[in-house]
Amino acid sequence: MTLPSDKGGAGLSAADYDAFCRFLRERTGLSFTEAKRYFVDRRVTERMAAVGVEHVRQYLNLLRFQASGEELQLLVNRMTVNETYFFREMYQLDCLVNAALDEVVSGRAPGSRVRIWSAGCATGEEPYSIAITLLERWNRVDDFEIELYASDIDSHVLARAREGIYEQRSLQAMPRDLIAKYFTRLDDQTWQIMEELRDSIDFSLVNIADPQQMANFRGIDVIFCRNLLIYFDDLGRREAASMFYDALSPNGFVCLGHSESMSRMSSLFVPRRFPDAILYQKPQS
Amino acid sequence: MALVKARKIDGAKPGSVEEGGDPLAWLEDADPARRRRAAHALGERPDAVPALSARLAREEDPSVRETLLTALVRTGTAAAAAALVPHLVSEDVGLRNGVIESLQQMPAAVVMPEVAPLLTAADSDLRIFAAQLVGKLPHPDRLDLLAGVIDRDPHVNVCLSAVEALMDSGDPAALPVVERLGARFPDDPFVAFSVDAARRLFSGA
């Protein structure tokens, strides 16, 4: 998940902006500073016009008290912009199949489950990249039953992820032979990932700032959460790290983005330096 | 194919209803995972601050300790800040560091009244922690309080902690204060080094 970097502009009063940011932080974990003011203003103004509300406080009340939560979901969808591509930050996928998974399954009987979760999966490039990397390059892939989970807070991108249709730009880092093997060409510009892969991943709408929703994730072996927590404040990152800890099996791993460090979020994990990447491991006990 | 259809995760379904009862009671459970879930659940309950703090003093499991600290930070009240401060004198370095980080993440308005008095504590180590903390708090009194330490504290290491915190602020107004420390400890080579470093920092050299 990524956010754009609009600057300048103002619409909400300082008090309203502060109230909005606190509300979004509490409900979604997303943290917006003063530097994002124009960005927030613009999207709130758009949504207020769409629902026909004139005053910011009325709109905030709608977000707070609407039983269905539909408007909050629509606003969150507008606040999050998703742009990624297949095989992004490939070094961690290398690490997964070259070292981390072998350690995860050490001592496990053949046929047992391995669970991998892509948190903040946006339009699906990451979980599908994980799936293809496993199938192509992990030499024990047939020894285990591998469950892939993918989640995002944005319902629109999840729908696109389930559909699995991508343009050339998303496939730029992917070898031609793998495109031919796993995708169907729809027209000059678009490809769709094969049905078998689409059906193998469980895509779900999850707010990782919500402890109740996070409580459904247990026994996960590897969590990919790349370039998502940078949009959380210090406390939000710390809480997310704590919830990842609960979701992971002992010795499970967290993969963060290249500019992120767990040591600045939480002391719960042990950094593990592999030849391809640094991952963060939940201790055995 | 080795990929199997993952069991459906339902994001809307409450996940911890099976616990039942009051999470305060689970704080003393023998199972660390249950204590961690209790701390999670108590993070928005101001009435739980005394229990969270009491458990923190006894807790030996690092994952539970981290969750207890996070719960107190999330509570974000003056009472939560006051409950954390006594742990600054703990002999346990991990706990002390966790408390310092936690106080830094709480609202400055509730932390400063609890931490500022520690700048004159009898224990010089506590004064050093307090200077480090005050330096990190986005509070309007921060620079004046650190300047007071530099002008008055008898212990050079406490003064140097305040200098470091002032230099982190990046405010050029701090330079005359740092230079006054040179006059207080003219024979201390590390003070001379720090004053020189501050001059270079604030002159942009």
Image (cartoon, coloured by chain):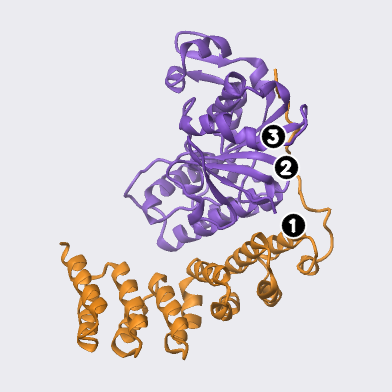
Chain label for disc 2: A
- The image shows residue A227, relative to residue A175, as above or below, that is below
Q: In the rendered view, would you say A135 is above or below A152?
A: above
Residue A231: percent from left, percent from top: 47, 48
Task: Give the amino acid type for the residue marked by disc 1 in the picture.
Answer: Ala
Q: Secondary structure at mark 3?
A: helix
The residue labelled by disc 3 is A105
Mark whose residue sits in front, 3 or 1? 3
Residue A192 vertical position relative to residue B48 in the rendered view, above or below:
above
**Residue A100 sits in which quadrant?**
top right
The C terminus of chain B lies in quadrant: bottom left
- Residue B17 image offset from top left, x and y in percent: 81, 53
**Residue occupying the point 55% across, 79% down:** B85
Q: CA distance from mark 2 to mark 1?
A: 13 Å
- The answer for which chain carries disc 3 is A
Q: Estimate the x, y position of residue A133 in percent, counting from the top left.
A: 56, 23
Is residue B71 among the parts visible in the rendering? Answer: yes
Q: How many marks?
A: 3
Chain letter, orange: B
Q: Amino acid at mark 3?
A: Val
Q: Quadrant of residue A61?
A: bottom right
